[in-house]
Image: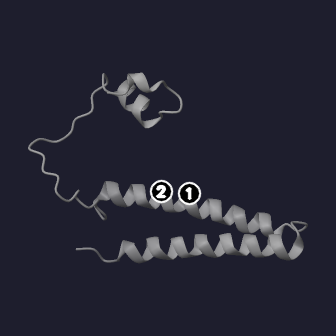
């Protein structure tokens, strides 16, 4: 049983990220970028984004959050990625870096 709700923590961090993004825009328009308040607000946004990413990784690894299943997709066996599949996956995920001929 969970003693806290991780969804509220994630939502509050997202709201703080948006607040700092808006503050950075406000200081950019108000002071024409001549003050360090804009840089500070955007720096906080970057730190909060990294914190959110780390929290999501930890929450997923601990089982506090789980992805939703794909509706209509039923698999009889789990997908296993081997070392031989890695170059093809990278080639398909990053199509701008490799020719499209490599993608199956």
Q: Which mark is residue 54?
A: 2
Q: Residue 14, percent across and down?
A: 52, 71
Quarter of the image for residue 85 reads top left
For label 1, the residue is 50
Q: Quadrant of residue 23?
A: bottom right
Q: Could you say whether the residue bearing mark 1 is in a helix, strand or loop?
A: helix
Q: Is residue 32 left or right of residue 59?
A: right
Locate residue 55, reporting x and y percent: 45, 61
Number of residues whose C-alpha sits closer than 10 Å to that of mark 1, classed few (under 14), some (14–19) or many (20 or more): few
What x and y, as percent, mark residue 45?
Answer: 64, 65
The residue shown at (49%, 57%) is: 53
Name the residue rendered at 22%, 74% in the picture.
Answer: 1
Label 2 element class: helix
Label 1 near label 2: C-beta < 8 Å?
yes
Q: Which mark is residue 77?
A: none
State the residue at coordinates (22%, 35%).
Answer: 80
């Amino acid at each position: 049983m969970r003693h806290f709700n991780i969804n509220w923590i994630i939502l509050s961090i997202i709201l703080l990220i948006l607040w700092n993004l808006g503050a950075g825009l406000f200081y950019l328009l108000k002071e024409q970028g001549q003050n360090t308040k804009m840089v500070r607000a955007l720096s906080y946004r970057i730190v909060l984004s990294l914190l959110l990413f780390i929290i999501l990784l930890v929450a997923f690894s601990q089982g506090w959050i789980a992805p939703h299943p794909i509706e209509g997709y039923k698999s009889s066996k789990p997908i296993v990625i081997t070392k031989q599949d890695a170059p093809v996956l990278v080639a398909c995920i990053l199509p701008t870096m490799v020719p499209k001929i490599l993608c199956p």
